[in-house]
Amino acid sequence: MDFDRDQARNCISNGAAVLGIEFGSTRIKAVLIDENRKPIASGSYDWENQLDHGIWTYPLEDIWKGLQSSYQNLLADVKNQYGVGIKKLAALGFSGMMHGYMAFDQKKELLVPFRTWRNTITGEASQALTELFQYQIPQRWSIAHLYQAILNGEQHVKDVEYMTTLSGYIHWTLTGEKVIGIGEASGMFPIHVHTSDYDQKMMEDFDALVSPKGFSWKLKEILPKVLLAGEEAGYLTEEGAKLLDVSGELEAGIPLCPPEGDAGTGMVATNSVAKRTGNVSAGTSVFAMLVLEEELKKVHPEIDLVTTPAGDLVAMVHCNNCTSDINAWMGLFKEVTDTFGLNLGMNELFGTLYHKALEGDSECGGLLAYNYYSGEHITGFEEGRPLFVRKPDSNFTLSNFVRVHLFTALGALKVGLDILLKEEGVKVEKIYGHGGFFKTKGVGQRIMAAAMGASVAVMDTASEGGAWGIALLGSFLIRENKEEDLDSFLHEKVFAGEQGTTVAPDMKDVKGFDEFILRYKEGLSIERSAIEFLK
């Protein structure tokens, strides 16, 4: 890290540091930043979800153990680097996996185990609410979980006093405030972008839909209050301080920013909250988020609508499969090179073969592949079979072979993006990429630029992730100029002078990807046959 150690030590000792903690699917990460908004210490805790009676969940005790452990590991890092502890913070923020369902009664007790985003048990509710609202309601959204529980006749629903998400629960427990950041709120219930609040008409429609059940609550009464980035969201209580820091050193009274979802913190961490920008996270799965200038003309089941932490509408394309298949092929190539005693490292192998793909035919020489390790809702598959196929006269070369697997890693994403870019006419000037797909410098960016027809940037800070993003939102809360908006704050205070690489689209690649995606769509019946006959 590029910082002055004495300056960082003084920042911590003076209580000027800001802390962000994010609850990811497999890791809870804490990042401490200084007055220049640069990371100066971190701590983490690995955890796993559990399948409990068919429900993917994390027990409450694991949530608190993970929070306390990640904070203690942060303290150990601070002590090791700077020889001091943490008594005060300038600001604090929490983020977590978006969506899901946490319902509490009037005694603040959890009514059913936390239902995470990973559950696909709300299909009936998702479809019914999408039709009712004429607005895409994904299965993982909180409102889908609530309505599915109603459709299932679950007894706990009548006792719901408050419903929130994981980050909202942590924030509520530590501050006593029933609030949520607007980006996270947009994964609970549709947001009206002009009011920066839940859509009132849709809330009334929902209340009317469930009124025959005779519940004592109205929807607005059980949802958290929506807050924009930069708005005050409460203070760490004495009880909250003891819960977070079991050593008892941390003092109460720290201001908190609104809790956010990991999609929102990803936007902040990649400087992609402005209109006509977006970000793509590409690793085991892949999703793209484009900040819209206006609402979409129609409902698309392939497109989710959420917001930035500042309340601007975002179109999200999420796909289950990305790099797993090409990683498997790279493992095979490693086995080949090991057999010949070449002893190549994986970084060298990936780098060499990824660059080889740039030598291939623009449309991959007629080759076709599908990277479906699991189902893919964008193209209508419940399960998947990784697949490679070619015609006898296809140009079967190494460069085309690697190229087609890089193309197909973005194939389902491209199908969704084409809806936005071609059918809806969404304008995008720059995309920020992060994740393993972009690790080999210049290659993943060029392929993504071809898929989108837009410039793709990868910043040097891309690996810092969502914990840094929520820490930045904490810093935004205590900014000196309260009139400064989030986009300006990020551009001028955080990313000014940030080094990175930008790759503009090569029109030959763009044309080639368009040709490939036609072949990809036409060949989906091959994938369906593989699933049917390869049991």
Image (cartoon, rainbow, N blue to C red):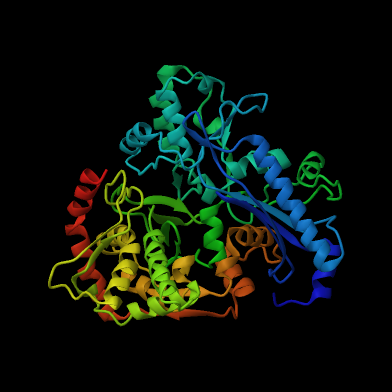
- Seen from the viewer's position, the closer of residues 286 and 424 is 286
Q: Is residue 526 above or below residue 141?
A: below
Q: Could you tell me which residue is drawn at 19 percent across and 76 percent down? A: 395
Q: Is residue 183 above or below residue 208?
A: below
Using the rendered view, name the quadrant where residue 14 is placed: bottom right
Is residue 502 shown left or right of residue 485?
A: left
Q: Could you tell me which residue is drawn at 51 percent across and 23 percent down? A: 157
- Seen from the viewer's position, the closer of residues 229 and 447 is 447
Give residue 58's position: percent from left, percent from top.
Answer: 58, 38
- Name the quadrant of the N terminus: bottom right
Whether residue 334 is visible here, answered yes or no, is: yes
Q: Is residue 305 above or below residue 123?
A: below
Give residue 375's position: percent from left, percent from top.
Answer: 33, 47
Is residue 358 shown left or right of residue 52?
A: left
Give residue 236's position: percent from left, percent from top.
Answer: 76, 46
Using the rendered view, name the quadrant where residue 86 is placed: bottom right
Is residue 363 shown left or right of residue 375?
A: left
- Seen from the viewer's position, the closer of residues 394 and 381 is 394
Give residue 172's position: percent from left, percent from top.
Answer: 67, 39
Image mark count = 0
Is residue 381 shown left or right of residue 228?
A: left
